[in-house]
Image (cartoon, helix red, strand yellow):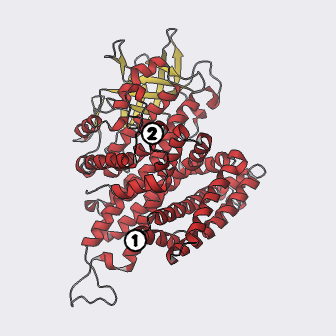
Amino acid sequence: MTYRPSVRDMAFTLNEVAGLSELLGKGAYEDVSADLVEAVMEEGAKLAADVLAPLNRSGDAEGAKLKNGAVSVPSGFADAYRKWVDGGWGSLAATTEYGGQGLPVALSVAMQEMWNAACISFGLCPILSQGAIEALTAHGTEEQKNIYLAKLISGEWTGTMNLTEPQAGSDLNALKAKAVPQGDGTYKITGTKIFITYGDHDMAENIVHLVLARLPDAPAGTKGISLFLVPKFLVNEDGSLGARNDAYCIGLEEKLGIHGSPTCVMSYGENGGAIGTLIGQENRGLACMFTMMNNARLLVGTQGVALAEAAYQHALAYAKDRKQGRPLGSTLAPGEMAPIVEHPDIRRMLLTMKSLTDASRAICYATAVAIDGAHAGDKREEAQARADLLTPIAKSFSTDIGVEVASIGVQIHGGMGFIEETGAAQFLRDARILPIYEGTNGIQAIDLVSRKLPLGNGSVVKGFIAEMRETAAQARSSNDKLLGEIGGALDAALDALDKATDYMLANLKSAPNDCLAGASPYLRLFGTAAGGHYLAQGAMRDPAAKARLALAQFYAANVLPAVHGLLAPATAGANSLFALTADELT
């Protein structure tokens, strides 16, 4: 498959639309310029296009393998990973104290888009390691940081997140893995974890597992969960690798997609217990893990953008090459056929793919810039609140878009899209996991409505809507007719968002089920409106770019109107959902 990152568009979105340029040249990013950001992206684009993208199809066909208790990744993955490590790509946003480069998180997110668009099965590994770095940086002991952080940041070692068990999926109250203190500061971990991405592989010499488990006297429920660091190989005092720990992959899941990524069933303690050390405080493991999960949720949203971009590039190339039929009014000679890109319906689908991809990219990048602002900006509390508000939207809206855009890509290929040979189906298969893992999109909607809308008694969400209103006003006051139309459509969409938001804030305490019944359509409404805001921003900030204006106008005319249909289900309440009993749902 051919994939080449659209660096210029990505850098423009990052710096000008998402606002990274406002943080550069001062504070923690004093030595970082917009030119440097684009130069880093250009270099990464070469690795993505020339090294990773060629592995996408072969990795899907070959898949990961488990043999004699060890997991091997598809051919070429290990060599590509060494090049990735040698390039220092894992260290971009990590702390300089342990070998990181201290660059913006937003730049790292843009690079993750490239890795995952090129080959998502490969790109999953760095995402998990990044989450482990975040968790250890925030909650690890000095000893844990000194032993593990530099190796994780460099990429020499990789990380995993171990939450799910056969009986405990999204509800961690049912978690049963045990941790028994040994009296020397270590714990013996026993239990089984499932769906562990890159739980074992042969790309790195050690794997650092972050495992949720219960202490013997732990309280019931999520209040009794602790987080433990359990390495594949124990580490000696001099930093060298020691004995093999009692943590093994005992099975690989057979999946719809992401075949090249090993999804492991992990067994801890079959031979006496895996040795681990506590991260953070006892019984506070969920708080530590959420540091990792929040990072991962944004990066999963970025995966949605990545697959949407890859599917779009694939479909566009096919549409330009595939000849079929003659458009009405065609001047072609008798018997000649036109490329299908000339047909209006194909053009509509391509523009839908492109506009949804660009909208979701801007949402993810804006979330990442807000995280950077919370760490290094002038208004840190305000930036953190914005990041908190946008994270569930970035994860859910962007991953839904990834699936939808990949599906449209299959449609553009026609019958050949249903045939594996063209590669269009792989994007759809790979994308389908994105709305499910790292917290299903339904859970993200619940989080948005129940936890994020009440931030600051509603002032955080109202502030963002006011910012989007200003974008609409600027577009409407422009002398450009198309910008005026875009501003009007955005204003109308924000009317719907205002009504739905007021409904949620007014009823959350008195009728929570009514709000949760409309949470998913509300999140989609919010994401759709926010996408229109960011596309309008892009069109206004680059008036010489005809393509940005045309895309924003298409989105305003063809995508934004969907918010009016979403307003009703977002505010309909729960009565119709429970009109039938569970037994009557037959």
SS label for mark 1: helix
Kindly identify the residue that appears in the image at 61 percent across and 58 percent down: 467
Residue 153: give x, y in percent of width and height.
Answer: 37, 31
Residue 330: give x, y in percent of width and height.
Answer: 29, 88
Q: What is the residue that sits farthest to the top in this orientation?
A: 183
Kindly identify the residue that appears in the image at 28 percent across and 44 percent down: 63
Q: Which mark is residue 546?
A: 1
Quarter the C terminus occupies: bottom right
Q: Residues within 10 Å of mark 1 (few under 14, many from 20)?
A: few
**Of the residues under marks 1 and 2, which one precedes in the sequence?**
2
Give the amino acid at mark 1.
Lys
Residue 573: give x, y in percent of width and height.
Answer: 71, 59
Q: What is the residue that sits farthest to the right in this orientation?
A: 510
> Camera-side residue: 331 or 222?
331
Quarter residue 80 falls in = top left
- CA distance for labels 1 and 2: 32 Å
Kindly identify the residue that appears in the image at 64 percent across and 47 percent down: 452
Quarter the N terminus occupies: bottom left
Give the amino acid at mark 2.
Tyr
Q: Which mark is residue 29?
A: 2
Q: Is residue 79 left or right of residue 456?
A: left
Q: Which mark is residue 134?
A: none
Quarter residue 336 falls in = bottom left
From the viewer's perspective, is residue 232 above or below residue 532? above
Q: Is residue 258 visible?
A: no
> Camera-side residue: 383 or 358?
383
Q: Residues within 10 Å of mark 2 (few under 14, many from 20)?
A: some
